[in-house]
Image (cartoon, rainbow, N blue to C red):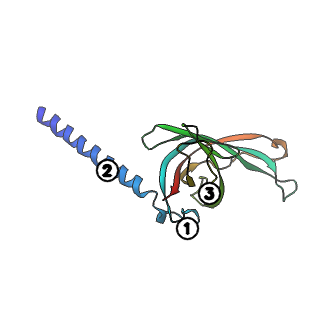
Amino acid sequence: MKTIRTVVLLSAAVTLAACSSMEQNASASSFSQEGFPAAVQVPAGNEVAMETVGKGTIWYECKAKTDAAGQFVWVFGGPDAGLWDRSGKSVGKYYGPPATWESNDGSKLTATQVAVAAAGAGNIPHQLVKANPAVGTGAMTGVTYIQRVATKGGIAPSSTCDAGKAGAKATVNYQADYIFWKAA
């Protein structure tokens, strides 16, 4: 019985070590620029400064289409998400408008969209934004670009948006990895 328990424990330890190794390798390779469409790749001369996972909601508002009289559409309003590092520690938040990334150390920044690329049905697109200078000193200081990848959910609601719902707001859940880059 003792031998079986030892074998089971050793087997579990080996399995956990293998899983841990795979997670580290997946994490290291999952943000290789070769894996993303050219439009959302970060320009050469930058390096990863921080990897985060954003989890929260995106809100949309039902508005009249500007180029189609009598038609309505859900329009992106802004995010409300927490940011966590790879170990699960809270490191900041992402909110808007305007879209703002804020570190727990108080530094924060906004950014200008450079490009988007499809990320699969039901998911908000991958995105590359160029960071504006940070306010405050801390983790956001010197950030040049932010890449949104590995998105899950977040697309506009599927519910009806018409004249009767004009001005209505709806939220949807989403998750995405936000990779912060600084000049090398």
Q: Residue furthest right?
A: 69
| Residue 39 position by quadrant | bottom right
Residue appearing at x 52%, y 44% in the figure? 139
Numbered disc 3: secondary structure: strand
Residue at 65% from the left image edge and 57% from the top image edge: 113
Q: Position of residue 43 (x, y in %)?
A: 54, 65
Relative image position of residue 132 (x, y in whole percent): 64, 52
x 59%, y 52%: residue: 123
Does residue 1 appear in the picture of this structure? no
Per the image, label 1 sits on a secondary structure element best described as: helix
Q: Nearer the viewer, residue 156 or 92?
A: 92
Q: Nearer the viewer, mark 3 or mark 1?
A: 3
Q: Is residue 92 left or right of residue 1?
A: right
Name the kind of residue labelled 3 in the image: Lys
Answer with the quarter of the image where residue 172 lies.
Answer: top right
Looking at the image, residue 124 lies above or below residue 102: below
Pointer 3: what residue?
130
Mark 3 and mark 1: span between their CA atoms?
15 Å
Q: Residues within 10 Å of mark 3 (few under 14, many from 20)?
A: some
Checking the image for residue 38, the label placed there is 1
Q: Mark 2 = which residue?
A: 21
The N terminus lies in quadrant: top left
Depth order, front residue of 31/62: 31
Q: Does the CB distance between marks 1 and 2 fall below 8 Å?
A: no
> Does 86 appear above or below 32?
above
Circle 2 packing at 10 Å, graded few (<14), some (14-19), many (20+), is: few
Tag 1: residue type?
Answer: Ala
Cα separation, mark 1 vs mark 2, equals 29 Å
- Label 1 environment density (alpha carbons within 10 Å; few <14, some 14–19, many ≥20): few
